Amino acid sequence: MTMSQTSPAVPSTSPATARRRPHVVILGGGFAGLSALRALQKSDVDITLVDRHTYNAFQPLLYQVATAGLNPGDVTYFLRAARMHQRNVSFRQGLVVDVDPNEQVVSFQDGERMRFDYLIIAAGATTNYFGTKGAEANSLAIYTRAQALTLRDKIFTNLEHAAASNTGEDVAVVVVGAGPTGVEMAGALAELRNDAMAAIYPELDPRRTHIVLVEMTDKVLGPFAPPLREYAAKALRERGVELRLNTSVAEVREDGVLFGDGNFLKAGVVIWATGVAVPKIVGDWGLPQGRGGRITVDADLRVTGFQNIFAVGDVALTPEPLPQLAQPALQEGKHAALQIAALVTGRGTTPFHYKDKGTMATIGRRSAVCDIALPKGRSLKLTGTLAWLVWLFIHIIMLLGNRNRLATFVNLLTKYLAPSRRTNPIVGDVPVFEHQRVDQRPLDR
């Protein structure tokens, strides 16, 4: 579907008699891209937001979609809705295959080209499998809405098939990576097993359904302070999550995981939650790249060697490397936009300074860890119910759109505050189990 022919942001469509405003192209509708978009709301520019999807998915809560706690629509925002609040924006759905920084042209997979005066690359990142054999083919990630839905259906397909076959075999789900995503995923799966399985899967023994969290270092939530890491590990173990620390993954097979020590664990689902990488196609754009393939930028977030191209978020490598999290992306996107606004009016740029607001992760019902940054280098560290309430409030506020906030609030409130055994998982399509048990008795006639 071609949008650029009717887009007011494409210079070629501007009347010859009209003054053409500078055209800003933003590649990516994630945290960084939308932050940049909003920051240019009052600038004398035309903006084209480009993304391969028509929606923004709130990535920090995709694990809730994958574990049947939220509907996908709860965490999805239609990118074209940005125009309802910002008239200098148009949207172009498409897959960018090339950026010519000298000709100032973006090329799409469908063959169309779009010129720009200023470019903000906020293309985000994709899953990093670190060359692990079989990981890409046999594990599932949760960085996109489609991946979260695929994972959700895979989890419940395995449960349904295990219940239908009734062989009494153990069921295992392996989560690789004990960062915030892996910890939150393992905690949610453990609660699903502990709270709901006895009621909705009476055929399965919860004690024989294993949630295994694998981490190659000796700690969970490595970037967090030691007391918070210790609390998270204890909370996971109390929920019955098996922690395999100091354990590497040598291979992911169709039926399980082969660890670096040679041991094999049979598993119906393997979830890959460790590390991200820049999309490979970025390497073909003629821009300087550093560690991990990230685009190198100067202090003002301009791509090194270019005056009108900025890179922000996960795809950017700043002079002082920053974590690939939401807050750096939000702040970088806003800063890049303000630099463009300054350049348009003939002013100079200023260096970017990251303001650390802290980090947080939830383990499950009334259990989370928060490290909130305070002035003068101090921090407030919270655990338990209070940390969980802070986590819940922040994540709801960060959602785009009041409908999303309300729907997420209601669904999470129902999930966490209702009696634990009365929650109703939100599931999709599960294929019918076709295996016929040999010892199955014939129906009475």
Image (cartoon, rainbow, N blue to C red):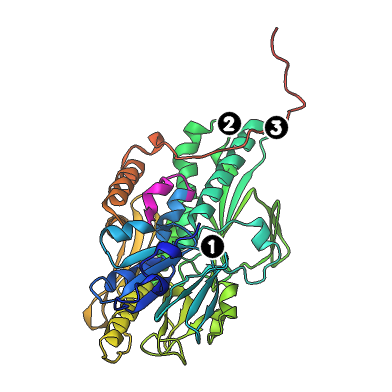
Q: What stretch of residues is rendered in magenta?
A: 66-78
* Amino acid found under the numbered disc labelled 3: Glu
Q: Residue furthest right?
A: 438
Tell which tag, 3 or 1, sits nearer the viewer. 3
Q: Secondary structure at mark 1?
A: loop
Image point (35%, 63%), residue name: 369
Separation (CA) of disc 3 from disc 1: 31 Å
In this rendered view, identify the residue nearer to me: 161 or 29: 29
Q: Is residue 289 left or right of residue 408?
A: right
Image quadrant in which you'd find residue 442: top right
Q: Amino acid at mark 2?
A: Glu
Check disc 2: other Cα within 10 Å, few if <14, some if 14-19, many if 20+: some
Q: Please check the rendered image and state whether residue 143 is part of the magenta-colored stretch, yes or no.
A: no
Q: Position of residue 367 (x, y in %)?
A: 36, 55
The percent coordinates of residue 345 (x first, y second) are 25, 86
The quarter of the displayed image where residue 31 is located: bottom left
Marks 2 and 3 sit apart, C-alpha to C-alpha, by 17 Å
Report, in whole angstroms, how far the alpha carbon at label 1 lies from the one at label 2: 30 Å
Q: Nearer the viewer's eye, disc 2 or disc 3?
A: 3
Instruction: Give residue 359's mark.
Output: none
- In this rendering, which labeled residue sits more in front, label 1 or label 2? 1
How many other residues sit within 10 Å of disc 3, few (<14), some (14-19) or many (≥20)? few
Q: State the residue position of label 3.
A: 434
Local secondary structure at mark 2: loop
The residue identified by callout 2 is 203
In the picture of the structure, the residue carrying the numbered disc 1 is: 273
**Residue depicted at 47% across the width and 32% down the height:** 199
> Can I make out residue 395 in this image?
no
Q: In which image quadrant can residue 410 be found?
A: top left
Mark nearer the N terminus (2 vs 3): 2
Residue 364 position, x and y percent, is: 40, 52
